[in-house]
Image: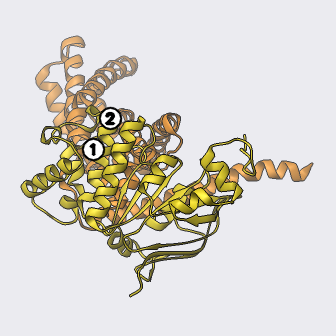
Chain colours: A yellow, B orange
Amino acid sequence: MSDTKIKISNLHKAFGRKVVLDGVDLEIKKGESLVVIGGSGTGKSVLIKCIQGILTPDSGSILIDDEEVVGVSEKEKEKLHAKMGMLFQGGALFDSLSVWENVAFGLLENKKMDKKNAKMEAIRVLRQVGLAPDVADLAPSELSGGMQKRVGLARAIATRPEIIFFDEPTTGLDPIMSDVINGLIIESVKGLGATALTITHDMASARKIADRIAMLYKGKIIWQGTVKELDKTNNEYVRQFINGSSEGPIKVEV
Amino acid sequence: MIQKFLRKLGKPLVKFFSSLGELSIFIVRSVANCFLPPFYLRNFMRQVMDIGFYSLPVVGLTTIFAGMVIAIQSYSGFSRFGAESAVASVVLISVTRELAPVLSALMVAGRIGAAMAAEIGTMRVTEQIDALTTLSTNPYKYLIAPRIVAAVIVLPLLVLIGDVIGIYGGYVVGVYQLGFNPANYIKSTIDNLEALDITTGVVKAAVFGFIIAVMGCYNGFKSKGGAQGVGDATTNAVVSSSILILIFNYIITGMFFSK
């Protein structure tokens, strides 16, 4: 067994004439937290969706635990999903279910846990992300943005996945709440010993969460390295991005 | 010039056929998933309540007035050649064969088809459907199968209730407004009652239920682009299912009654 959890090679994906991923190569080690940074619309979300099998790439290979996942059957995909958890950008909580049912969804539907135990487990995980047990019976719509993020995180980690994806975990939160969520992400990922892949354009968040950072630009990974290396790099694209400057090699297409 | 014209013609044509293909794939996948476990009983029951129980007032009002109108119209029409006595059987036949199934289905398409498209469409644009997938739950089984099965089972039941209410509407007008003898009216209704009238109505209802659920789910499922996308999905769901209901009404009627 190698210590590589996810290995992506030469991944291509286009929508019509619009090329989104143009040969992505990326490796994520077991237990590592990788953050992919990149501007809006550079295909970060598409990358995650390809790994999850929600989108089918046009060509290329994705190995998870040394097994090819591109083009596998629906059944295989469901098995694969049991290994994964995801925190969605907007939370994507099921609004027809209560908070605890959201958190316990994977336990109830797939691990066939009975209701009482699932609720207890949900409350335990909710407490882990800093939410009081009395929110368990509320509807997701009754919660603030930060609380919804926490519930989303709780749902993502409740099934104890081996791989967790974070899609812009701090978007729409104030800086302090962002830091709280970042802290919770680190805690829960390390607590589970999971492999984490985060996509974000929030540099403060990336610096805090990442073991390693990769930058996606025009459908390719143009740079990768540790946070320390990030500050020393001479890569003009990366420098422009982390400094948040409109001047440089990256031209904003209007 | 010709090339330009052909291009203009070709683009919508290609689009039409590609969405027809998309719809066909969607239907095959959805129907297959109706028969494959796991089954989500709770979601199914919720749909039965939504489609069936909460549609009762709408269906009741629609069919009672339809029955009343048919009684008046057939009375005034048939009095021209002295055939007023046929009112009861005309009400019976038109309500059970046509009015109850078609009008109920159109009302339910507005009520339920729109709701399905809006709910599933919102789930799509807020990534809730992707969230289902990542929680290893097949959205076809969790969202779509319960809706289709519920609609196919419940719509015939609604139509049976609509039949009774519609005929009663005709009876009320016949007896209290047009002066028929109640006993005679009831007798002529029962004498003319044929199983075929009811069966065709029920068969139609099942097909219409399928159309409503499929079009509602399909449009919701493929919707994109936020609030506007969901709005479009809702409109498309109602318009397309209404038109399909009318088309299939003709086809089924032709299958049963044309010789």
Count of marks, rendered view: 2
Residue B142, given in percent of the width and then of the height, sits at 29, 56
Residue ID at (24%, 13%): B178
* Picture disc at residue B155: 1
Q: What kind of element bears circle 1?
A: helix
Which residue is farthest right? B1
Is the Cβ of the residue at disc 2 closer than 8 Å to that at disc 1? yes
> Residue B120: percent from the left, percent from the top?
39, 45
B70 is higher (above) or lower (below) than B192: above
For residue B148, say whether it is visible.
no
User: For this rendering, which residue is in front, B79 or B114?
Assistant: B114
Give the quarter of the figure containing the N terminus of chain A. bottom left
Question: Does residue A34 appear to the left or right of A123 in the view shown?
Answer: right
Q: Quadrant of residue A177?
A: top left
Q: How many C-alpha atoms fall within 10 Å of the one at disc 2: few (<14), some, or many (≥20)?
A: many
Badge 2 is on which residue? B104
* C-alpha span from label 2 to label 1: 8 Å
At mark 2, the secondary structure is helix
Quarter holding residue B56? top left
N-terminal-most mark, 2 or 1 = 2
